[in-house]
Amino acid sequence: MNTYVVPFSTSDSVWVEKITARSLQEAKDKIIETYVNLWDLDYPGDWSEFVDIIEAANAQVCLLYTSPSPRDVEESR
């Protein structure tokens, strides 16, 4: 499993989501599903469209990959 960090920001606040997923696409799908339901958004066709929807709502989103540390890899064995 990989860990992805997703910072969001609006004019009022900043927050960070931590997503664990097997792939980048799975991480994107989890983020889209969460925020489409949370903010009652139209379901986007892909990540780019999701980012456009978020930006149209005066928010920003970014998806960052954090590779597992050697300790995390060792602990998962």
Image (cartoon, rainbow, N blue to C red):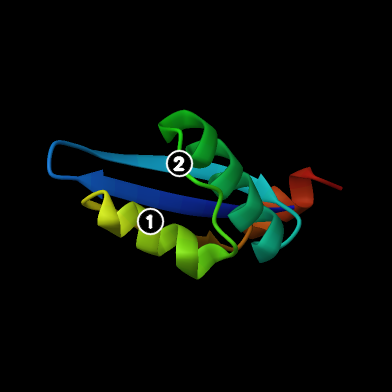
* Extreme residue toward the top, this view: 38
* Image side of residue 10 versus residue 4, left or right: left
In this rendering, does residue 62 appear at all? no
Percent from the top left, x then y, of residue 60? Answer: 28, 56
Identify the residue under disc 1: 53
Amino acid beneath label 2? Leu
Residue at 27% across, 56% down: 56
Q: Is residue 29 visible?
A: yes
Height in image: 21 above or below 13? below
Q: Secondary structure at mark 2?
A: loop
In the figure, 36 relative to 48: above or below? above
Q: Closer to the N terminus: mark 1 or mark 2? A: 2
Picture quadrant where residue 69 is located: bottom right
Return the mark for residue 7.
none
- Within 10 angstroms of label 1, few (less than 14), some, or many (20 or more) residues? some
The residue that appears at 41% across and 61% down in the rendered structure is 51
At a point 72% along the width and 62% down the height, the residue shown is 23
Q: Is residue 62 left or right of residue 9?
A: right
* Mark 2 surroundings within 10 Å by alpha-carbon count, few (fewer than 14), some (14 through 19), many (20 or more): some
73 relative position to 24: left or right: right
Q: Which mark is residue 41?
A: 2
